[in-house]
Amino acid sequence: MSNYAVEEVARRIQHTNVNPDVTREDIKWLCEDCLEYGFDGVMLQPCWIEEAKKHLAGSNVKICTALGYPMGGATTRAKVLEMEEVIALGAEQVDFMANIGFLKSGMHQEYHDEITSIVQAAGGKVTKIMLEFGMLTEEEKVKAAELAIRAGVTYLKNSSGWGKGGHATIEDIKLLKRIANGKVEVKASGGIRDMKKATEILDAGASLIGTSAGAKIVSGSGEALSDY
């Protein structure tokens, strides 16, 4: 295991709370954690972007949001419109889920085209596709990642961390790093709740970690906010 300073690990964490019952007070504390520990970004639902902007004004903490999950089955047009809206609201990075059913149906062109449309709607902002590896075969994992790279994403992400998406594994992150081959970056998410797992995931090739356990990872105390 590589030796990482706590501050270095913190700079790779996107501190997350996308629970459906999150409150305004939860968002305040989420943002305050980011400021206190020096996290890379805050990850929250689109409806809380403007609230986060108030708490993070003047800081270097990135405002990140997610769309199209946890099912991925919204129409492409709906996802495009949502992307345009969250960018207009102030999201700097967006994690999104493409239609997994398209991929598993062998509808590779449709899968690719949807990703392309979503990425284009981001207008040059950082995009991260949630590939939901927990639902895919090894062959599908490779195909999904290759199509996403071709469609122009900034990051490949193993999972949303929700439902059937699965948790981050060393093997999956190494696979994504190999497929990325320097063309895009890798974000890991799902089940990363302590420093040991975080450093193992970074060693495997992740540039960013999405976790609700950011404060617990860097301070050694507290609990994860969710399974994400």
Image: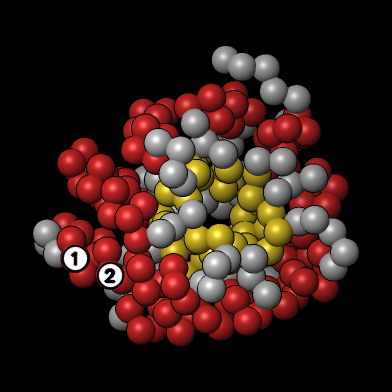
- Residue under the point 31% across and 80% down: 75
- Number of marks in the image? 2
- Horizontal and vertical percent position of residue 13: 65, 44
Secondary structure of the residue carrying numbered label 1: helix
Callout 2: few (<14), some (14-19), or many (20+) C-alpha neighbours within 10 Å?
Answer: some
Q: In this view, does 210 lie to the left or right of 151?
A: right
Q: Residue at left 76%, top 56%?
A: 61
Graded by Cα atoms within 10 Å as few (under 14), some (14 to 19) or many (20 or more), the crowding at tag 1 reads few
Residue 56 makes an appearance in the image: yes
Marks 1 & 2, CB-CB < 8 Å contact = yes
Residue 109 disc label: 1
145 shown above or below 152: above
* Residue at image location 37% in from the left, 32% down from the top: 178
User: Which amino acid type corresponds to the residue marked 2 in the rendered image?
Assistant: Asp
Image location (x, y in percent) of residue 129: 42, 57
In the image, which disc is placed on residue 113? 2
Q: How far apart are marks 1 and 2 (CA)?
A: 6 Å
Task: Point out the residue furthest to the right here.
Answer: 58
Q: In which quarter of the image is the N terminus?
A: top right
